[in-house]
Each structure stands twice: as structure tokens, then as C-alpha cells.
Image (tube, rainbow, N blue to C red):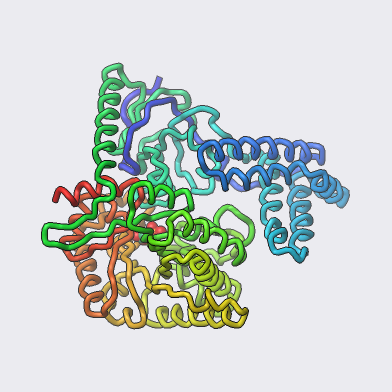
């Protein structure tokens, strides 16, 4: 039996005890097998339906009702005889099972897309998704589910894959690749799942399957075949953790005022309506970062403005009318790929056309329309709920991009007026940008004109300042937002914001640790946005300072 300790880097705190389950490498490989028969394709649809029904049940039971509804609707689609008929039709034309499934999904999607009802038309993406799930099953690249609580071991865990694994079966995550600020880790932290990354010696070939282990998210270690003494100390640590949590929960609702009299606002970074509920539960002062990409991932076509309006409205409703919602426009590119947007391959995606740069590509009016639809949906949702709206653009480097953002917002308002939606057209929204690029950090006073706020993304700012890819596990030592070179940039942003007369905050991971929060308040930054799971501890740390 494998034994010993696999050393990694802390990703998400907490400890877990249980058997190891390895995510098969084939999950990450593309569908390519052909030669399957039409009957096998129909059987794959039935398997997809069963999987989706199970997903729906587990997500609903976990309190994610909206996700559950989507999966059960998809399950019904997989069982629709019309889809099976379409598969047989496609196979008559000579297509093999996999190709017939894809073609049938496309045909059914085209039918739905042609309907005058916007809601039904939007279901086209769902049916394509169902067909490709069945195709994955047929090609043997389905995402297998562990079926019991496990510590997941993998080379990496893309967000789209982690979404498929029932939360209650995922008690811990140990990755050979990854870094503290990779999106898989941010999701794990949001879900409260202990996680370690960059465990270079971790076996990901399945040889550890079934081995009992202790995952220590704070220490960054995975201990194989632990002794009874090890297990006892985990229990003691878990008890201390529970006592800490209870004490910190007692501080919720207490405003954070530093000894010098400065008030600190603790905001939440969220990626869904469920996260918003978590933020409210821990007494967040609002949302400092909504990663709106959650609406764009895991689908086959972009969402329309109506669907986005519904999603943003839901979040405003969860927050209530008093708490601000800072909605970040789509931050695609870098490590967040969206196949249906058909973006060209880039040699250096983190230095490529990412974030707001996508809104400004000359020959891609569809992408500009996507950003415009986000702004429109945000204004409509805020107007409908009397929400406090802040709109923020990611990856800004120069003044021309700020001017473009202001023009985009003005154009959306004019368009809403033209559509007779005067409430939304005139609804107030603070406009801001993320400071993630050193060039922007050094010129905030100039970028500030016309804006209300800036928010520093220390995750990206650090990778660009240190020339250290945020997802490269070999560079953990350089991925340090408290390094002197990064802190000098943070000071420059604080000064530039004061000069330019805009609010300044931080929404990178640095704000979500007690030491990081103290560092930031020490240089005069009092708007801190972090994972909802970090708020209680940071509040206690600052109150005790
Ligand atoms: C950041 O870069 O610090 C940030 C908050 O944005 P993201 O992590 O989504 O890139
Ligand atoms: Mg960023």
C-alpha cells in the first residue's frame, strides 16, 4: 500500500479524511472514436438521461435548486423520442453513432432556435449539450462519478468537470498541477472543499485509488495510509476549527472600524446566486466581484440578454436592495476558454486577447454584442429590483479602453431608451475597471476620469508584475501578492485613485487572508472583496488588530 506524504501548496483550507479517487485522464481528452452503431447511440442517450436525473437530484438536495432544474430539463430532453428519431435519421445518411448524435443535436437545436419564443429558442444550447454528453458517453470520455465521498486526485480539475461531480461526494481535492489562484481552486474555496495544488510527486495514474488519506488544505499535504494518532490529531484540529468558526460567526454584523477610525468594508467574490446567499449569510457588506463568466461556461452558445437579466435579477433578489453588486463583465481568455466563441489559438493566452480586449476586436461584432447584452441585462435587473449596481471591466491597460467602456455603456443606455425601457435606460450604475496590468496600476489617476471606482485584481497583477504564470506550479514562490514589487504597485494604485478621485478596492485573493487584509488597510485600501468563506476570519483579524 502506498504510504508517505505528498507535499503540495495550500489551495483551500480545512481537512478531509477518506479514500482517494483518481479522475481518469481520459476525461480531459476530446471525443474521437467512431464506428459506434445507431443502437449504441440511442443507448447512450438513455445513459445520459440517467446521469442527468442523478445530477438534478444531487444538486437540488445540495440546495442548488436552479442547477437541479436545468439538469432535470436536460434529462427530459435526452428521453424525448424526437431526439432518438433524429439520431436514426442522421445515421441513415451514413453517419456513425457519435456523428449521428452530434448531427441530431444540431438538427433539434436548429428547430428550437427557429421558434419565435425567445425562451424556447434559448433551449437550443441545452439540447446540443445533451447530445454531446451522449456522444462523450459513446466515445468513452464521459465524466465518471465517484459515487461516494472521496478525496479527488487529478492532474488538474477544469471548472466544467468539477461542476459535474456532486458536492457531497467531493470531500477534498489534491492536484498535481494548479496554483492558489487557478479557477478550480477558487471554486473549491467557495464551496468550502479542502484543496491542495502543485503536489508534484502526486501519482495521478490511478495507483492510489482506494487508499485512505488525510488531506490538510491549510498545510498543503496529503498523508497516505495515516496512523490512528494522525487521525486523532485531525479530529482535534477539526474540533478547533469548529470552535473558531462559532466564535467568528458571533462577530457578524459588527462593522469593522480600525483603531485610526477608518471603516473597512468586507465584500464577497461570487460566481452564482448560491454564492450570493453565502455572502449574505456571513454578513458581507455587498459583492465586490461577480465573476459573470458563470453564465457563459458549460454551454454551446452564448446566453441572450433575457437569460442574463433573469440570472442577475436573482442575485439582486438574494442580496436585497441595500447591498451593492459589482458585476464584472465577461473575463474570458487566459485560463478561461469558451469553445463556442471560436477564438483563435494563442501562444500566450494570459498575454492575449482576454477580458475587455474581446469587446474591442474590430471584426467581432458578436463579442461586442455579448458585452453590450451584459450591460443591458445588468441595468434591467437592477432597475427591476432597485439594486445597487456597479459595472466593472476586466483587463484594462490604457485610457482608450476606458473611453471605449464608457461609450459602450452610453450606447446600451441609448438602445434601452429606443426600446422604451426608460427605467433601465436611466438607472444609476457606478462604472469601474479592474487594475490587473502594471501599466494600468501606474496610471490610475489618468484612467480614473469618468469612472467611479477601481478594483485591484491582485491575482493577475501579481502574475504580470512578477512575470510568473498564475497556473504554473513551478512558480509558487513568485506567485506572491505581498512581494515588494507588487506592494509598490498597490501603493501606486492607492495614490492614483486618491488623485483621480475614485474609490479603490481589492478583489484578488490577497484581500482574503488576515495578513493580506492588514497589509492593504496599512496602505490605505479599505474596500476588500474576498471569498465568502474568508470573510469571518478576516473580520476577526481586523477587529483584533
Ligand atoms: C484577479 O485577477 O485578482 C481577479 C480577481 O480576477 P480573476 O481571479 O477572476 O482573474
Ligand atoms: Mg483577473
- In the orientation shown, which residue stands out farthest toward the left? 260
Foreground of the two, 271 or 438: 271
Image-based side of 277 in relation to 138, left or right: left
Residue 417 position in % (x across, y down): 57, 81
Q: Residue 296: x percent and y percent?
A: 55, 59
| Residue displayed at 33% across by 32% down | 15
Image quadrant of ligand 1?
Answer: bottom left
Question: Can residue 468 be seen by looking at this rendering?
Answer: no
Query: Residue at left 20%, top 74%?
Result: 495
Q: Which residue lies furthest to the top in this view?
A: 228
| Horizontal and vertical percent position of residue 4 | 32, 25
Residue 305: give x, y in percent of width and height. 59, 67
Q: Is residue 10 visible?
A: yes
Q: Residue shown at 31%/52% (left/top)?
A: 475
- Number of callouts: 0
Q: Nearer the viewer, residue 424 or 527?
A: 424
Q: Quadrant of residue 435?
A: bottom left
Whether residue 486 is situated above or below residue 502 in the rendered picture: above
Residue at 70% across, 45% down: 135
Q: Is residue 124 left or right of residue 405?
A: right
In the rendered view of the protein, which quadrant contains the N terminus? Answer: top left
153 or 45, which lies in front?
45
Amino acid at each position: 500500500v502506498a504510504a508517505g506524504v505528498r507535499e503540495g501548496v495550500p489551495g483551500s483550507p480545512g481537512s478531509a479524511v477518506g479514500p482517494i479517487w483518481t479522475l481518469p485522464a481520459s476525461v480531459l481528452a476530446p471525443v474521437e472514436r467512431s464506428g459506434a452503431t445507431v443502437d449504441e447511440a440511442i443507448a447512450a442517450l438513455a445513459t445520459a438521461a440517467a446521469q442527468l436525473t442523478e445530477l438534478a437530484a444531487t444538486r437540488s438536495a445540495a440546495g442548488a435548486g436552479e442547477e437541479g432544474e436545468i439538469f432535470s430539463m436536460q434529462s427530459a430532453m435526452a428521453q424525448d423520442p424526437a431526439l432518438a428519431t433524429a439520431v436514426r435519421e442522421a445515421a441513415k445518411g451514413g453517419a456513425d453513432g457519435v456523428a449521428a448524435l452530434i448531427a441530431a443535436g444540431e438538427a433539434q437545436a436548429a428547430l428550437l432556435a427557429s421558434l419565435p419564443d425567445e425562451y424556447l429558442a434559448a433551449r437550443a444550447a441545452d439540447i446540443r449539450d445533451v447530445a454531446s454528453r451522449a456522444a462523450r458517453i459513446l466515445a468513452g470520455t464521459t465524466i465518471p462519478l465517484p459515487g461516494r465521498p472521496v478525496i479527488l486526485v487529478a492532474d488538474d480539475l477544469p471548472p466544467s468537470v468539477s461542476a459535474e461531480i456532486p458536492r457531497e461526494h467531493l470531500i477534498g481535492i489534491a492536484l498535481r498541477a494548479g496554483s492558489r489562484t487557478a479557477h478550480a481552486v477558487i471554486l473549491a474555496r467557495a464551496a468550502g472543499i479542502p484543496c491542495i495544488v502543485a503536489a508534484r510527486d502526486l501519482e495521478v495514474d490511478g495507483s492510489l485509488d482506494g487508499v485512505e488519506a488525510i488531506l490538510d488544505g491549510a498545510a498543503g499535504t496529503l498523508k497516505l495510509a495515516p496512523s490512528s494518532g494522525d487521525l486523532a490529531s485531525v479530529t482535534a484540529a477539526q474540533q478547533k476549527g469548529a470552535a473558531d468558526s462559532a466564535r467568528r460567526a458571533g462577530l457578524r454584523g459588527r462593522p469593522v472600524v480600525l483603531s485610526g477610525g477608518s471603516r473597512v468594508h468586507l465584500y464577497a467574490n461570487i460566481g452564482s446566486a448560491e454564492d450570493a446567499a453565502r455572502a449574505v449569510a456571513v454578513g458581507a457588506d455587498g459583492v465586490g466581484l461577480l465573476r459573470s463568466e458563470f453564465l457563459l461556461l458549460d454551454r454551446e452558445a452564448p446566453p441572450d440578454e433575457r437569460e442574463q437579466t433573469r440570472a442577475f435579477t436573482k442575485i439582486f433578489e438574494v442580496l436585497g436592495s441595500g447591498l451593492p453588486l459589482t458585476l464584472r463583465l465577461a473575463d474570458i481568455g487566459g485560463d478561461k476558454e469558451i469553445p463556442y466563441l471560436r477564438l483563435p489559438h494563442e501562444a500566450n493566452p494570459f498575454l492575449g486577447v482576454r477580458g475587455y480586449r474581446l469587446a474591442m476586436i474590430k471584426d467581432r461584432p458578436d463579442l461586442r454584442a455579448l458585452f453590450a447584452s451584459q450591460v443591458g441585462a445588468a441595468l434591467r435587473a437592477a432597475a427591476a429590483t432597485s439594486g445597487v449596481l456597479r459595472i466593472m471591466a476586466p483587463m484594462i491597460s490604457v485610457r482608450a479602453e476606458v473611453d471605449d467602456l464608457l461609450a459602450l455603456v452610453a450606447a446600451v443606455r441609448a438602445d434601452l431608451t429606443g426600446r422604451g425601457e426608460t427605467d433601465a435606460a436611466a438607472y444609476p450604475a457606478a462604472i469601474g475597471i479592474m487594475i490587473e496590468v502594471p501599466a494600468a496600476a501606474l496610471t490610475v489617476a489618468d484612467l480614473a476620469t469618468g469612472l467611479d471606482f477601481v478594483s485591484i485584481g491582485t491575482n493577475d497583477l501579481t502574475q504580470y508584475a512578477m512575470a510568473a504564470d498564475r497556473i504554473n506550479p513551478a512558480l509558487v514562490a513568485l506567485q506572491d501578492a505581498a512581494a515588494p514589487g507588487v506592494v509598490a504597485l498597490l501603493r501606486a494604485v492607492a495614490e492614483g485613485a486618491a488623485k483621480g478621485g475614485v474609490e479603490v478596492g481589492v478583489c484578488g485573493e490577497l484581500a482574503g487572508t488576515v495578513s493580506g487584509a492588514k497589509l492593504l488597510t496599512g496602505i490605505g485600501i479599505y474596500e476588500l472583496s474576498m471569498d465568502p468563506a474568508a470573510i469571518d476570519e478576516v473580520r476577526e483579524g481586523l477587529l483584533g488588530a
